Amino acid sequence: MRILVTGGAGYIGSHTVKWLLANGHQVTVYDNLSLGHRAAVPAEILVEGDLKDVDHLDQVLVGHQIDSVIHFAANSLVGESVTHPAKYYQNNLLNSLNLLERVRRHGIQRFVFSSTCATYGVPDAVPITEAQTQLPINPYGNTKLAFEKMLSDYAPAYNIGFAALRYFNASGASPDGTIGEDHTPESHLIPIVLQVALGKRPHVEIFGTDYPTPDGTCIRDYIHVDDLASAHLLALEKIVPGMGRFYNVGIGNGYSVREVIQTVEAVTGKKIAVKEGPRRAGDPPSLVAGSDLVRKELGWKPNYTELRSIVESAWNWHKKHPTGYAK
Ligand code: UDP
């Protein structure tokens, strides 16, 4: 396939690009490098561009004879989306619509969308199945759900096939240590705790200790980024024009914030200083995937089934790249 990967220089994007290349596909990365890293993808496949620039997008789709699109480019921080919703509606919704419009006009029939478990809001039940009510509790989730709806309307009308992958918590790094997770500023739990282990932060703050969970801290389903990457390719291969599929992609194991910190202590051998703080706006207490559908329909199976091995791969990257891609 000749695949355009928007946001391909970002964290999940770059790991997926690596996976696609390793599986023999022709890949073009379209990224404005606002959040992505030049060093995260091979220079010869990177096109610097913005989804606002539809003429440029046209040139790239035609010039590279693109037949499939994987769309990662987005803002994805729950807390930031609460304080700065305009950014989320502009980028995640309007820029995504620009892309979808170009896909329609060029007759591209395969589209994979990076959606999120944040579309469920506070779930009716855990583990979460795809059939559960989607009622986001933050603007990030709202924008992702709105684009799922756009895809659902476009697909039958314009014969576009799509898969929307509702990710749980992407984590870990490529086992060869070449690419990993690097956000500025960092807001994700595992890299923050690893930065404490590296002595780059004095402590990690736990956002809320009064949740209705066994230890009072939030529970999340941490999935290795390479296992997410493999799900994208499987989804792309099974797409049927005119039809859309939705898959939860998570391991199905939940870990609390305190358990993540304990796991980092076990992997790194360092004592992690902790400060207990208030809840962060927009965080549901527990998000764990029911992932039967993706396993059954796509034949997907995670290679990393324990938090420990995921944290080990992340630690391997952070030790080698203590300043991320800046080094
Ligand atoms: N979290 C925390 N302290 C931090 C960062 C995150 O307690 O410094 C918590 C956060 O409230 C959530 C979990 O860790 O319950 C995972 O947060 P992250 O930002 O990594 O991913 P998200 O669930 O927002 O996608």
Image: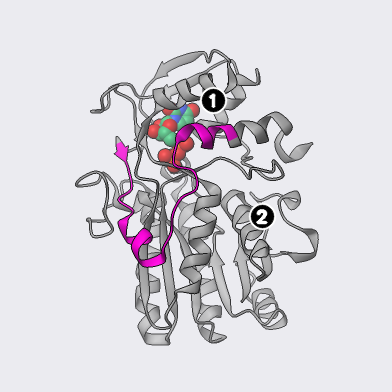
Q: Is mark 1 within 8 Å of ligand 1?
A: yes
Quadrant containing the N terminus is: bottom right
Q: Start and end of the magenta stretch? A: 286-312
Dot 2 amino acid type? Ala
Q: Toward which corner of the image does residue 173 lie, by quadrant?
A: top right
Q: Nearer the viewer, residue 176 or 112?
A: 176
| x and y percentages locating residue 84 in the rendered image | 47, 45
* Residue beneath the point at 71% across and 50% down: 40
* Residue beneath the point at 30% across and 37% down: 286
User: Ligand 1 quadrant?
Assistant: top left
Q: Toward which corner of the image does residue 48 lie, by quadrant?
A: bottom right
Q: Is residue 76 left or right of residue 58?
A: left
Q: Toward which corner of the image does residue 211 lie, by quadrant?
A: top left
Query: In whole angstroms, how far apart are the C-alphas of marks 2 and 1?
Result: 24 Å
Dot 1 amino acid type? Val
Q: Name the residue beneath numbered marker 1.
A: 193
| x and y percentages locating residue 199 in the rendered image | 65, 17
Quadrant containing the C terminus is: top right
Tell me, for residue 9, which label it has, or none. 2
